[in-house]
């Protein structure tokens, strides 16, 4: 008998809930999505050529992200299961802002010797997860701008053509935003 009363109460409470529209075109709050098949003119569709080997853009209905390219493995130190990605919502200024996030532009810079040494020393001092003994051969700095105009910096450090690491700064460079990259093919 108690089961019947609880079931009836659940059915009546569900029947009294108003349906919410799922599209802004229907006049309600709804949820906006990115049309990955037909992106708007201001949606970035490719990374700079300097990063075409280890990374590519991936579109989801809720956000764009930078992910590992085929033939590359990205992983956090000490983990083989959690796959790192760089989402368009990553800049701290974008946190808590509604709507889908996407990238509108990128700039890649190949950093020189003094800049590479300075960044290596800075990361070694500030990031406990950065345990690189020697400075990398090169660092590519990717500046990514999202649809809100907020920027993030992703530093791709290469020890060789086949392996390296990434430090993501949103604007702070946090230990949890460090991951390893390696060519698997």
Image: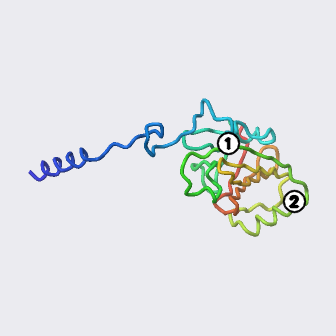
- In space, the residues marked 1 and 2 are separated at their CA atoms by 25 Å
Residue that badge 1 annotates: 68
Q: Residue furthest bottom?
A: 125
| Res. 58 mark | none
**Residue 1 at what x, y percent from top left?**
8, 51
Q: Residue furthest front?
A: 27
Taking the spot 37% from the left edge, 43% from the top edge, the residue there is 20
Taking the spot 48% from the left edge, 43% from the top edge, the residue there is 31
Chain-order first, disc 1 or disc 2: 1
Q: Residues within 10 Å of mark 1 (few under 14, many from 20)?
A: many
- In the image, taking residue 116 as reference, residue 100 lies left or right, namely left
What color scheme is it? Answer: rainbow
Taking depth in this image into account, of 107 and 167 the one nearest to the observer is 107
- In the image, taking residue 43 as reference, residue 100 lies left or right, namely left
On screen, residue 170 above or below 162: below
Taking the spot 18% from the left edge, 50% from the top edge, the residue there is 9
Residue that badge 2 annotates: 115
**Label 1 residue SS:** strand
Taking the spot 71% from the left edge, 54% from the top edge, the residue there is 151
Taking depth in this image into account, of 66 and 69 the one nearest to the observer is 66
- Quadrant, the C terminus: top right
User: Which one is in front in this view, the residue at disc 1 or the one at disc 2?
Assistant: 2
**Label 2 residue SS:** helix
**Residue 100 at what x, y percent from top left?**
57, 45
Q: Residues within 10 Å of mark 2 (few under 14, many from 20)?
A: few
Image-quadrant location for residue 171? bottom right
Taking depth in this image into account, of 126 and 130 the one nearest to the observer is 126
**Residue 103 at what x, y percent from top left?**
67, 44
Q: Are marks 1 and 2 in contact (CB under 8 Å)?
A: no
- In the image, taking residue 148 as reference, residue 131 lies left or right, namely right
């Amino acid at each position: 008998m108690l089961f019947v009363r609880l079931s009836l109460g659940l059915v009546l409470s569900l029947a009294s809930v108003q349906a919410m529209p799922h599209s802004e075109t229907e006049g309600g709050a709804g949820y906006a999505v990115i049309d990955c098949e037909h992106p708007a003119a201001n949606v970035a569709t490719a990374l700079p050529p300097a990063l075409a080997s280890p990374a590519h853009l991936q579109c989801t209905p809720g956000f764009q992200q930078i992910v590992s390219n085929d033939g590359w493995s990205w992983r956090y130190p000490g983990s083989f299961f959690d796959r790192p990605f760089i989402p368009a919502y990553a800049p701290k200024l974008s946190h808590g802002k509604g709507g889908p996030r996407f990238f509108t532009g990128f700039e890649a810079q190949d950093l020189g010797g003094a800049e590479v040494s300075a960044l290596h020393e800075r990361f070694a001092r500030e990031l406990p997860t950065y345990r690189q003994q020697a400075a990398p051969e090169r660092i590519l700095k990717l500046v990514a701008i999202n649809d809100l105009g907020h920027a993030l910096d992703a530093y791709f450090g290469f020890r060789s053509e086949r392996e390296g690491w990434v430090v993501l700064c949103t604007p702070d460079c946090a230990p949890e935003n460090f991951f390893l990259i390696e060519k698997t093919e």
